[in-house]
């Protein structure tokens, strides 16, 4: 990338502002030869200032005029150009992007590569599979990820209905608390984010499933859908990157002679680089990187003020109480030394900071300046990545809309974001939905990526779209009319070092991506960002985004309403059928199906009298809970057979109410307790103080009841982890036993928890 400094060039507002942001100062000789003599230029400026003052006197009170604003912006841009030349600004030539395709053949070779590496069929229908089925696929596709098999064997899916304890360290992406405590200060826990897979991606001819960590619904689905269209119709994404160079800044203050300071830095450039590579980043140098360049930039508040004052009012009306961001006088111009460091596979923040701090004292002596800040810049202009795709117009048809019309609407939406900052912010937020999701999943500094991206979006002088769309002909020379989409942004990522070495989840996600290099990872990330952006603007332009987004958001609504995992799909279907995706509709459905099961059983008392006489303790230990056995022996001998019959009937009725689930009789038992005590322990309203029969669980039946959200309280007696169930929001327990002399009758009603009070 190279910016022109010819004074005869015609500068519009955007290019001038970009020039002001990026121009460095490394060659004093390059700026000394001005095409216009100094005296002529000075006289011209004096005349211009006089004319502007005269124009302002006659223009007071004039209505807003776009033409005048445009001319004022041009004047400001030209003034900034003169300011830079007078400050000895010279060019820093950034290396061009290099294609990531094999052989550097470019984007038109991707379709051919795609034929050799298609998307595996095993991923088909991944969205509709259960968690266990997904774990099976992951274990098959990525056998090197040991945690997947541990997860598969320790977890139990919805088919069995039993909630087994799951070791947190076994789950992919889980971070042990003791590790988290070593990573940050004042650690109190680990906050989880859903980890999914963006499917169907073909990037530089390689089939990839991309880990994405994001809590927002529709992001993973949208990216996967767009990637599938790009892969099948356009051959996939092609990427290009510019390298792994990060830049540190040393701010020099109170410099008496800025031009002489620039000359001093230039003359000592090689010596400063040697110091950096031998004492400050020797390990990076051995790996093929290290400090590669040192140059200067003059930063001027005057130039910034001239440009922002001219540009800001074009689209933005300042608020009366907003905070103005301007430098304080008198320090409005200073020198900044940039040090470029090739950080190889690292993100590189630590090493470039070390270089800046280590060289600052020597640079201070050379320039006779005081050192200000010494820190990296996250605007990594020499670490850019670009992704691009082409889709034939005749394959773009969607939702009943012709492909040509779809392409036209997408380009119109892009044009909106290209010229209006209000639209551009939301447009770019959609891009960052995909970028951040992959960055978080792979352990990158997503805050740095965000900051650089938004600054890059403002490089023209006004915030605009990061992506670009156009209708043209395919690059393969075949003359096919295509929609071409591209996304370019500075992006600092690493495949080695930092949290990647401590977080077990990052090891797994990098394995899923087939251990990409830093440059390959940056290409993957921008490809996902472009896919997400394409999916979003296609949806907005063709049918509106809310319908599809809310359909996926319905799952979150169902969970918020208290739906157990196994009925979430039912609740979503009901809300979509009613066209009412909200908590109230979800609760209506849950209340309607709150009754989980009903069981009734009759037991003959005399049968248990004979059974006990025959089997004694063997019968008790096989079918009854220890607490029931204690109660059995506490009763008079004449009531023991009736007690066994009634409790057996409760167990049989409960077994029937649970329907298809297998239970163990000793894990189902009854006890009597105070209803008011129960109400206090569950935060339910107290109803009455009386001894009532309660149905209790232990063991695997307890886990099952919790899974089905049938449990409302943990008992506090000597029995471990016992739970009370089958209540109607604080009313009498829904278990009853009747005796008519010869028979014991038990009735059990299982009801789910569907109120906010009971949600976890």
Image: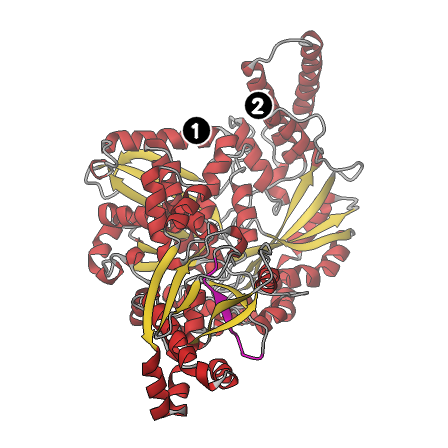
1 and 2 marks in contact (CB < 8 Å): no
Binning the other alpha carbons within 10 Å of mark 1 as few (below 14), some (14 to 19) or many (20 upward) gives some
The outermost residue toward the top is 58
| Nearer the observer, 193 or 644 | 644
Name the secondary structure under disc 1: helix
The residue at 40%/61% (across/down) is 750
Name the secondary structure under disc 2: helix
| Nearer the observer, 177 or 674 | 674
The residue at 54%/79% (across/down) is 719
- Residue 417 sits inside the magenta stretch: no
Picture coordinates of residue 613, whole percent (x, y): 36, 91
Is 93 drawn above or below residue 717 in the view shown? above
Q: Which scheme is used to colour this image of the protein?
A: secondary structure
Is 176 drawn above or below residue 586 in the view shown? below
Secondary structure mostly taken by the magenta-highlighted segment of the chain: loop
In the rendering, which numbered label is found on residue 314? 2
Picture coordinates of residue 200, whole percent (x, y): 29, 54
In the rendering, which numbered label is found on residue 416? 1
**Quarter of the rendering containing residue 85:** top right
* Earlier sequence position, callout 1 versus callout 2: 2
Is residue 164 at least partly visible in the picture? yes
| Nearer the observer, 421 or 302 | 421
User: Which residues make up the magenta segment?
Assistant: 718-727
């Amino acid at each position: 990338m190279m910016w022109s400094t010819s004074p005869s060039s015609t500068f519009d507002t955007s290019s001038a502002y970009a020039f002001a942001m990026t121009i460095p100062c490394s060659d004093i000789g390059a700026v000394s030869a001005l095409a216009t003599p100094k005296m002529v230029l000075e006289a011209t400026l004096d005349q211009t200032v006089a004319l502007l003052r005269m124009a302002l006197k006659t223009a007071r009170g004039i209505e807003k005029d776009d033409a005048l604003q445009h001319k004022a912006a041009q004047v400001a841009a030209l003034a900034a150009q003169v300011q830079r030349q007078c400050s000895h600004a010279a060019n820093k030539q950034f290396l061009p992007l290099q294609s990531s395709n094999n052989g550097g053949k470019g984007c038109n070779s991707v379709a051919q590569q795609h034929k050799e590496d298609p998307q595996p069929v095993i991923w088909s229908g991944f969205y509709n599979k259960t968690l266990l089925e997904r774990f099976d696929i992951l274990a098959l596709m990525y056998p090197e990820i040991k945690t997947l098999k541990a997860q598969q064997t320790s977890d139990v899916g919805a088919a069995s209905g039993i909630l087994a304890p799951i070791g947190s360290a076994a789950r992919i992406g889980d971070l042990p608390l003791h590790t988290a405590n070593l990573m940050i200060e004042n650690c109190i826990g680990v906050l989880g984010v859903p980890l999914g897979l963006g499917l169907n991606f073909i990037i530089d001819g390689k089939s990839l499933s991309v880990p994405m960590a994001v809590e927002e619904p529709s992001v993973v689905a949208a990216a996967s859908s767009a990637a599938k269209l790009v892969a099948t119709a356009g051959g996939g994404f092609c990427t290009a990157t510019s390298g792994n160079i990060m830049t540190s800044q040393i701010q020099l203050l109170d410099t008496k002679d800025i031009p002489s300071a620039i000359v001093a830095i230039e003359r000592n450039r090689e010596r400063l680089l040697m110091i950096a590579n031998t004492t400050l980043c020797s390990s990076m140098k051995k790996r093929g990187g290290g400090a590669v360049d040192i140059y200067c930039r003059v930063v001027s508040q005057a130039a910034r003020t001239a440009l922002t004052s001219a540009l800001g009012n074009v689209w933005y009306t300042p608020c009366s109480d907003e905070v103005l961001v301007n430098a304080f006088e008198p320090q409005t111009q200073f020198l900044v030394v940039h040090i470029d460091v090739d950080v190889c596979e690292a993100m590189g923040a630590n090493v470039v900071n070390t270089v800046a701090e280590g060289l600052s004292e020597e640079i201070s002596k050379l320039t006779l300046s005081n050192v200000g800040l010494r820190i990296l810049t996250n605007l990594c202009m020499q670490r850019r990545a670009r992704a691009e795709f082409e889709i034939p117009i005749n394959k773009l048809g969607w939702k009943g809309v012709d492909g040509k019309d779809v392409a036209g609407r997408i380009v119109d939406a892009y044009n909106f974001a290209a010229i209006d900052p209000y639209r551009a912010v939301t447009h770019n937020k959609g891009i960052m939905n995909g970028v951040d999701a992959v960055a978080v999943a792979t352990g990158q500094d997503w805050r740095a990526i965000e900051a650089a991206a938004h600054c890059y979006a403002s490089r023209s002088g006004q915030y605009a779209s990061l992506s670009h769309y156009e209708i043209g002909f395919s690059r393969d020379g075949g003359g096919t009319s295509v929609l071409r989409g591209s996304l370019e942004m500075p992006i600092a990522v690493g495949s080695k070092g930092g949290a990647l070495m401590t977080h077990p989840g990052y090891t797994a996600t990098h394995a899923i991506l087939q251990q990409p290099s830093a440059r390959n990872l940056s290409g993957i990330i921008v490809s996902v960002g472009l896919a997400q952006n394409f999916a979003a603007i296609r949806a907005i332009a063709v049918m509106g985004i809310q319908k599809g987004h809310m359909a996926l958001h319905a799952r979150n609504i169902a969970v918020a309403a208290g739906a157990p995992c196994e009925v979430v799909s039912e609740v979503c279907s009901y809300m979509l059928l009613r066209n009412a995706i909200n908590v109230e509709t979800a609760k209506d459905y849950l209340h309607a199906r709150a009754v989980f099961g009903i069981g009734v059983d009759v037991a003959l008392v005399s049968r248990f009298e004979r059974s006990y006489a025959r089997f004694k303790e063997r019968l008790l230990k096989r079918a009854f809970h220890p607490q029931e056995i204690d109660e059995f022996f506490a009763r008079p001998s004449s009531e023991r057979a009736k007690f066994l019959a009634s409790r057996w009937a409760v167990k049989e009725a409960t077994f029937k109410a649970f329907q298809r689930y297998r239970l163990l009789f000793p894990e189902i038992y009854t006890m009597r307790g105070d209803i008011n005590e129960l109400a206090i322990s569950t935060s339910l309203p107290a109803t009455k103080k009386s001894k009532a029969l309660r149905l209790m669980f232990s063991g695997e039946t307890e886990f099952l009841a919790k899974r089905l959200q049938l449990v409302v309280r943990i008992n506090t007696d000597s029995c471990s982890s016992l739970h009370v169930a089958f209540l109607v929001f604080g009313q009498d327990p829904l278990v009853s036993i009747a005796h008519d002399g010869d028979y014991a009758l038990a009735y059990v009603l299982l009801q789910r928890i569907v109120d906010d009070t009971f949600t976890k």
